[in-house]
Amino acid sequence: MNHDELTRIFRDPPTLETPRLTLRRMLKTDAADVYDYASRPEVSRYLLWNPHESEAYSRRYLVYLQTRYRAGDFYDWAVVWRKTGKMIGTCGFTNLRLETNSGEIGYVLHPDFWGMGVAPEAVRRILRFGFMDLRLHRLEARYMIGNDRSRRVMEKVGMQFEGVSREAVFVRGEYVSVGICSILYGEWRDLYL
């Protein structure tokens, strides 16, 4: 995989399917759905961004993302609950490092869907895309200490806990420690193929 190939893929990211979900490009028309979950303090508590202040803010964010998609440098999908067509979160790559064939996965989910196995379902599909389509060697995910729910998602998909970076991130006026989990291609292959 080279930079040009990656850019070409993510200018128009492929739609990915799971038994209950469709993962597709985020659209400007998703603003109400994004605001529905991104405005909730419990959703952003362990994330780097603050709750969205209005649906207009969510719309502006989605308009901005369209420029990132056109540039081919945004690697995130809308997570859509297939039964209703509602966008209930996002899942994708927060970064990709071609020089090491590795990347980092991130996800966020509407709290109405917590505890239903939705996040692991979406992450498993992104892992498959990362290993099979992008031919990556290593994928990792990070979580703020205290966000046990997120760590459980990582472990459910086969990631192994590697350790904690102490006070590694400054967010909302304080330093927070960050845990990291990862999975290698060979480990994923043994679990899923």
Image (cartoon, rainbow, N blue to C red):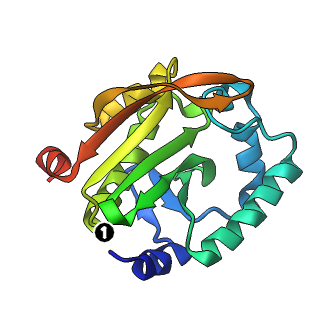
Q: Work out whether 180 lies above or below 78.
A: above
At which x and y percent is residue 72?
56, 74
Kindly tell me whether residue 23 is visible in this rendering: yes
Residue denoted by label 1: 133
Q: Work out whether 128 lies above or below 49.
A: below
At which x and y percent is residue 190?
11, 47
Category of crowding for the residue at label 1, using alpha-carbon neighbours closer than 10 angstroms: few (below 14), some (14–19), many (at least 20): few
Kindly tell me whether residue 115 is visible in this rendering: no
Q: Quadrant of residue 49?
A: top right
Quadrant placement of the N terminus: bottom left
| Left or right: 94 in relation to 110 | left
| Left or right: 106 in relation to 33 | left
At which x and y percent is residue 88?
60, 45
Q: Residue at x 62, y 36 (%)?
A: 110
Quadrant placement of the C terminus: bottom left
- Please state which amino acid type lies under the numbered disc 1: Asp
Q: Residue at x 80, y 41 (%)?
A: 52
Q: Quadrant of residue 181?
A: top left
Q: Quadrant of residue 50?
A: top right
Q: Work out whether 84 lies above or below 117.
A: below
Check disc 1 and report its element: helix, strand or loop: helix
Q: Residue at x 78, y 50 (%)?
A: 32
Q: Nearer the viewer, residue 20 or 61?
A: 61
Q: Nearer the viewer, residue 8 or 81?
A: 8
| Left or right: 17 in relation to 191 | right
